[in-house]
Amino acid sequence: MSLKRNTIWNLIGTGLPFLLGAVTIPYLVKHLGIEGFGILTLVWALIGYFSLFDFGLGRALTQQVSTCIASNDRSKLPHLVKSGLLFTFFTGLIGGLILALLSDSLGHSWLKVSLPLQGDTARCLLIASLGIPLTTVTTGLRGVLEAYEDFKGVNLLRVILGIANFGLPALSVMIVGSSLTLIVVSLIVARVVVLGGHLYLMNLKLPPEWLKSKFSFKEISGLLSFGMWMTVSNIISPLMVTADRFVISAVLGASAVAYYTVPFEVLIRVLVIPAALTSALFPRLAATLKVDSDAALALSLRCMKLVASVLIPICAVIALGSYYGLSLWLGHDFAEKSWAIVSVMSLGLIFNGIAFVPFATIQASGDAKITALIHISELLVYIPLLFLSLHFLGVIGAAAVWVMRVGVDLLLLTIYAKKINVKYHL
């Protein structure tokens, strides 16, 4: 299957929803207010972050199912897939319960939401907790489909979910007004529909008897042995991506979150390019490393150069045009407070985007322990620096510390990715 075609499908899956977001975000900011929209972005972040409760089994399923397919050993697939999906469902329930228990404290005190919105915020977080098991199971289903390299189906469903994430809140505001509760309910309904779509596509791939197969602790043990360290990265990496907005809310108040989060959410969409490439690259690398590690590492280096050549000019344009672009999109007042943040973050986008490739290479080799240890060390330094920068420099300080972190991340991942070839030749 074509790596180029799969990458294009990944770009479509993430790019089309972004176009809708570019239209609906100003509308939502206007009608929900800065703080209300900031709360909505926190809900988006929490549902995404709590997908970590799949404990790395999404990518572990991709790796192991693709290995079974490559070796023509399909007899274990029903037990492997059913065990993995049931595990992600039960762990998702645990994640949802944790968020439900924390929702009242988050809404009424921890996030420093203004008094009129505290009850609504707590209620939204409680409803959002229902989306956690839906998200973890969908992650597992997506992992299986990606092992079959069905990137067309995966990304058509991703388009539907992305359109729902941006479109349903706007539609809800148009029809019933600015109720955050109804907006979050609509987002949960969308995730139910998308989960059903993934399940339908997977049924077309697997033999019918997979539904009747038994849960296997042996298969779970195998998946977890691969995904254990990957899980650590899956916990810490999203935490470092989303923690800044919660720290900003705690230090500066919820209203300040929007001036950081809105440009960040737009800029981070640039990373659809390396994300699209590495999602298609991962199952290919996992198989190729077992057969020809030299070819796998050469492919990895070519992809790093390709990502750099695409991102550098894009980010240069973003940095130079940040004030003008924000003024046209969200007005001069918003641009005054956010343009410098965008300019600083554009450098970090280059570092972060290139780092996708060595990260995928290391994990495709099965050595997820390295990425986990790198992320643990980064977190221990990043969070204290984030608090200090906010106290002394404000929101721009948070952006600068983020750029420093992703720069160090790129350096460390590249060093260890180059060592993989040595391991396979031993």
Image: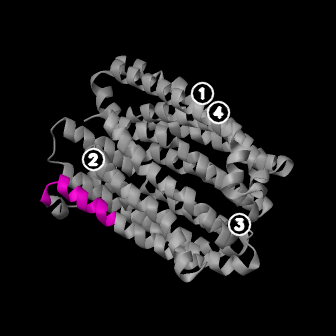
User: Is residue 17 located in the magenta-colored stretch of the structure?
Assistant: no
Neighbour class for label 1 at 10 Å: few (<14), some, many (≥20)? few
In terms of sequence position, does the residue under pointer 2 or pointer 4 come before the other? 2
In terms of sequence position, does the residue under pointer 4 or pointer 1 come before the other? 4
Q: Main secondary structure of the magenta part?
A: helix
- How much space separates mark 2 and mark 4, taking CA atoms? 34 Å
User: Is residue 202 located in the magenta-colored stretch of the structure?
Assistant: yes
Determine which residue is flagged by label 3: 34
Residues drawn in magenta: 195-208
Eyeballing the image, is 219 above or below 188?
A: above
* Dot 2: element: loop
Contact check, label 1 and label 2, Cβ < 8 Å: no
Determine which residue is flagged by label 4: 316
- How much space separates mark 2 and mark 3, taking CA atoms? 39 Å
| Residue type indicated by callout 1 | Leu
Q: In front: mark 1 or mark 2?
A: 2
| Residue type indicated by callout 4 | Ala
Q: Quadrant of residue 74?
A: top left
Determine which residue is flagged by label 1: 411
Determine which residue is flagged by label 2: 150
| Residue toward you, 133 or 159 | 159
Q: Residue at x 32, y 62 (%)?
A: 86
In terms of sequence position, does the residue under pointer 3 or pointer 4 come before the other? 3
* Dot 1: element: helix
Q: Quadrant of residue 69?
A: top left
* Dot 3: element: helix
